[in-house]
Amino acid sequence: GAALVRDVPVILSGTSPIQLPHAGLTSGAIVKAKRSNSPESESETLTTGWVVLNHVQLIPDTVVVATDTSLGIVYTENIDFIVDYAGGRVRRVEAGAIANGQTVAIWYDHFHIYSEGDDYSISPASGQITRKTGGDIADGQQVLVDYTVSLGSVSDSLIDQAINESGEAVLLIVSEAHHESPA
């Protein structure tokens, strides 16, 4: 199995490796940070299908959907529209106030995604991340890291051994007269 870990804050200073909270990562970590003070703006036609925006990795709680750029009517997330923040997608809610096929104005903030190899390197086995000299990550900058931790597997024989050992431990605290009792 595996576990997804999101938005781990890390300050990358110099080129010394920084230990993430986990080791045994799978490949495909995402290193990101906010780099703009102005939101993106797009005009999109919404249906019950997903509309892909120009950016992925939207910053949570930053999406605003309105009838037009003058904010005539501002719609409500999860009532009128739904956002896939990681995928950069928006769709209308069928029972919401946005009509099927309606064109709306959408504003949002998004994370800048850094490039492994150019901006940073990561050691999946040790769970260490290192800032690259000459990359886009500034010295001392905080970034957020998303990654997947590979969960180890346990063999049947190890499970059997644990059951036997726990049974023996229970027998040590139960009086001998009750060792053969059914319950």
Image (tube, rainbow, N blue to C red):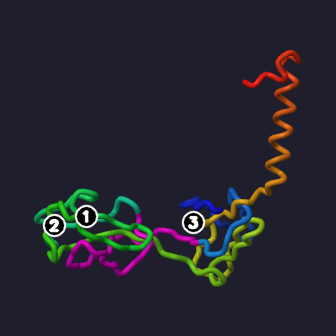
Query: Which kind of residue does numbered mark 3 sit on?
Result: Asp
Q: Residue at x 20, y 73 (%)?
A: 105
The Cα–Cα distance between marks 3 and 2, rounded to whole angstroms, is 33 Å
Mark 3 or 2, which is nearer the eye?
2
Mark 2 secondary-structure assignment? loop
Q: Quadrant of residue 173?
A: top right
Identify the residue at horizontal 41%, vertical 65% (top origin): 59
- Residue 29 appears at what percent x and percent y? 61, 72
Q: Earlier in the sequence, mark 3 or mark 2?
A: 2
The magenta stretch is: 30-59
Tell which residue pokes out farthest to the left in this image: 72
- Which residue bears the numbered disc 2? 98
Q: Secondary structure at mark 1?
A: strand
Mark identifier at residue 81: 1
| Residue occupying image coordinates x 64% and y 62% | 2
- Is mark 3 in CB contact (under 8 Å) with mark 1? no
Q: Residue drawn at (70%, 71%), measured in percent from left and top?
A: 130
Cα gap from disc 3 to disc 1, whole angstroms? 25 Å
Q: Is mark 1 in CB contact (under 8 Å) with mark 2?
A: yes
Rendering quarter of residue 139: bottom right
Under tag 3, what secondary structure? strand
Q: Nearer the viewer, residue 20 or 49?
A: 49
Q: Earlier in the sequence, mark 1 or mark 2?
A: 1
Residue 181: percent from the left, percent from the top? 79, 22
Residue holding disc 3: 146
